[in-house]
Amino acid sequence: MAKKIQNEEVFQAITVGKKNIYLFIGGIILLILGYILMAQPPVYGFLTITLAPIILVFAYLVVFPAAILMKDTPESKK
């Protein structure tokens, strides 16, 4: 019986809320923006060398892990 209760707690912890979806969509938008900026014509310009990689690293290392790891609190479900 104890194993069944533990399994139910695990399934409750993996639920996806609105915050997770919004963060994931925001990450996808940042990825698209980063790749579009990287494809701009001046190859050695500020956009392609500096800004686009910063946006891509931020999306991959901050936004996507936050979307995966963030849990909805009971106050946010109201």
Image (cartoon, rainbow, N blue to C red):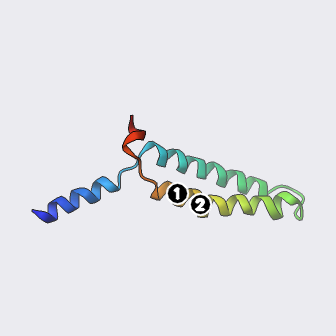
Q: Which mark is residue 62?
A: 2
Residue at which label 1 appears:
66
Q: CA distance from mark 2 to mark 1?
A: 6 Å
Secondary structure of residue under mark 1: helix
Q: Residue at x 41, y 47 (%)?
A: 72
Q: Residue at x 87, y 59 (%)?
A: 46
- Classify residue 2 as left or right of residue 53: left
Residue 10 rendering spot, x and y as whole percentages:
28, 60
Q: In the rendered structure, which amino acid carries the disc numbered 2?
A: Val
Residue 43 rendering spot, x and y as whole percentages:
87, 63
- The quadrant the C terminus occupies is top left
Relative to the observer, which residue lies in front, 48 or 59? 59
Residue 61 rendering spot, x and y as whole percentages:
60, 64
Q: In the rendered structure, which amino acid carries the disc numbered 1?
A: Ala
- Classify residue 14 as left or right of residue 2: right
Q: Which mark is residue 50?
A: none
Taking the view exactly as shown, the residue that stands out farthest to the top is: 78
Q: Are marks 2 and 1 in contact (CB under 8 Å)?
A: yes
Taking the view exactly as shown, the residue that stands out farthest to the front is: 75
Relative to the observer, which residue lies in front, 56 or 10? 10
- Classify residue 66 as left or right of residue 12: right
Q: Residues within 10 Å of mark 2 (few under 14, many from 20)?
A: few
Secondary structure of residue under mark 2: helix
Q: Residue at x 9, y 62 (%)?
A: 1
Q: How many numbered callouts?
A: 2
Residue 27 rendering spot, x and y as whole percentages:
59, 52
Q: Residue at x 53, y 44 (%)?
A: 22
Q: Residues within 10 Å of mark 1 (few under 14, many from 20)?
A: some
